[in-house]
Structure formats: C-alpha cells, structure tokens
Image (cartoon, helix red, strand yellow):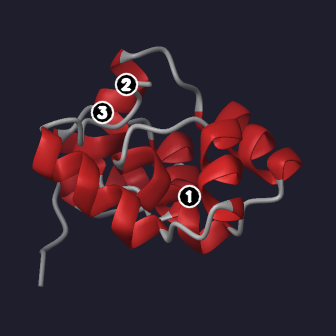
Amino acid sequence: MWTLGPDAIMGLMLGGPADPAWAQAGVAPAAAAVWELLGVTPDQARRLGAAGREPLAVVAEWWRAGVPLDEVASWLTAGLSAAEAVQQRAEGVTPEQARAFAALQGLGSPGES
C-alpha cells in the first residue's frame, strides 16, 4: 500500500490517480486516468506517450474499431494497431495469444506497430 506524499496529494487534487507510479512515470493525472481505464500500466503509458500516442485518441481509435475495452492493453502490448487487432480477432487470435507471440519475438513494446 502506498502512502500519501506530494505526488499523491496533487493527483487527488487534479482528479487523477494518486498512485505515485503514475507520477514517477511522468504521466499527467488526467492521462493516467484514461490509460488506467484501458488497463495500461504506468510504464506502458509512458512509452505510448513518448511515441506520441494520446490516451483519448487511443480510446477513440479502438472504440471505433469495435475492440472491447478490456482487450485494448493486451493488443497495444502486442504492438498492434486497432485495425490489426480487428483482423487478428477475426482470424481467431486472442489478445493473450498476440501478446505472448509479440513477447517471444521481442516486439512487446506498446505503441510500436
């Protein structure tokens, strides 16, 4: 269990997660709230942000593609775009299978597709 410190208190004041891991990853509280909703970890969110991915744009992309919210983090971790995930889903590939395959190939960095 984490304790309240300046980062946690600021996160609470700004309406974002107070977990220090998000602050340590350099993710703004509002962005952290959206990434957390998608199931993305603070480190993944940092890498996605560094790749120019904005959380609301990611939500819109995946929502429009019809990919269930609880699958997004796994597909992102597998390095796939929403369109690629839709194609893989149609072929019977699960998000966990895609994630495992990407990890085996060393492609598991989010945002790289």
- How crowded pointer 2 is (Cα within 10 Å; few <14, some 14-19, many 20+) is rated as some
Give residue 13's position: percent from left, percent from top. Answer: 49, 54
Task: Look at mark 3 in the image and give the residue it sits on.
Answer: 46
Instruction: Say which label, 1 or 2, has the lower sequence index.
Output: 1
Q: Quadrant of the N terminus?
A: bottom left
Q: State the CA–CA distance, disc 1 to disc 3.
A: 16 Å
Instruction: Say which label, 3 or 2, has the lower sequence index.
Output: 3
Q: State the CA–CA distance, disc 3 to disc 2.
A: 13 Å
Q: Quadrant of the C terminus?
A: top left
Where is 5 relative to 57, above or below? below
Q: Nearer the viewer, residue 94 or 30?
A: 94
Q: Are marks 1 and 2 in contact (CB under 8 Å)?
A: no
Where is 31 relative to 111, above or below? below
- 3 on left or right of 108: left
Q: Nearer the viewer, residue 93 or 19?
A: 93
Q: Is residue 57 visible?
A: yes
Q: Give the residue type at disc 1.
A: Val
Q: State the CA–CA distance, disc 1 to disc 2.
A: 14 Å
Task: Look at mark 1 in the image and give the residue it sits on.
Answer: 72
Q: Residue furthest bottom?
A: 1
Give me the disc on residue 112: 2
